[in-house]
Amino acid sequence: MEILKESLVQKEKFKTAANKLLNNCFIVKKKEDTRNDYIFIIQNKDLFNEYFDLLGYSLEVNEMQGVVALKSQHGAGRLRLKKIESILLLIFRLLYLEKRKELSLNEEVVVLTDEIHQKYTMLKLEAKANLDKTTLRDIVRLFKRYNIVSNVDSDITMSDARIRIYHSVLFAVPNDNLSSMYEAINEKLNKYMKGGEQSDDEETLQDQAD
């Protein structure tokens, strides 16, 4: 880590990027406020690997999809999600996979709030048949913190409001085979529909994520 001793600027860039990884789990190239951090990490992968290895994390880099993620080597530091948060995460991933089929890798995946409501309504959950505005707003804010989604329009409760879904949604629960992931998501959503998943802690985000 000699480079950090020689340059104050490099040291500050490292500190900023490392803290974002620890606090937000994912660094996304396509996201404006993390693009420079992504580039710096890619340029100094060995340095970040050495640092996070000391903390018990491994650095996962996918340059094709433009995502850097942290993975706990010991299964610690996982973010536990409530059932409704788990459901929305699955819906985001499902919508991402459906939209991605129609787009090139360079094009952003953007969905409408109405599409989220449609997917949710299809579940026919007795305990919470409709997704209310406050819940949706809170969950989007949560996943925005982890650089999984961001809102294009300020009021996401409007039916035509746009929400951007990043490649990092695929890393929340990694799977190398997109087809099998698509099937697994649908299978899990079907379990929710049938009341087969009762726990309030259904998903974990990577690092938080493992």
Image (spheres, grey):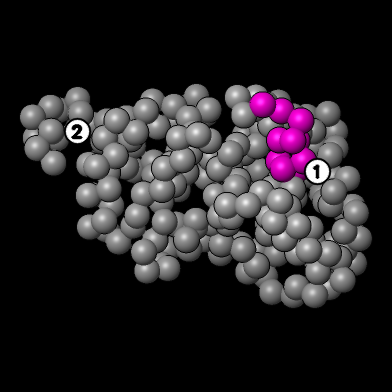
Closest to the observer, 107 or 84: 107
Q: How many marks?
A: 2
Identify the image quadrant of the N terminus. top left
Closest to the observer, 67 or 154: 67
Asked whether the viewer can see residue 120, the reply is yes
Q: Please state if 17 lies on the left or on the right of 106 as rendered.
A: left
Quadrant position of residue 196: bottom right
Q: Is residue 35 magenta?
A: no
Q: Is residue 183 above or below residue 141?
A: below
**Residue at (39, 61) in percent of width and height:** 72
**Residue at (60, 37) in percent of width and height:** 166
Question: Dot 2 lies on which element?
Answer: helix
**Residue at (52, 45) in percent of width and height:** 146
Question: Dot 1 lies on which element?
Answer: helix
Which residue is under mark 2?
11
Asked whether the viewer can see residue 37, the reply is no
Q: CA distance from mark 1 to mark 2?
A: 42 Å
Give the magenta-colored segment's residue range.
95-104
Instruction: Please state the horizontal and vertical placement of residue 151, each as a whole percent of the image.
Output: 66, 32
Q: Is residue 98 magenta?
A: yes
Neighbor class of circle 2 (other Cα within 10 Å; few <14, some 14-19, many 20+) is some
Which residue is under mark 1?
116
Identify the amino acid type marked 1: Ile
Identify the amino acid type marked 2: Lys
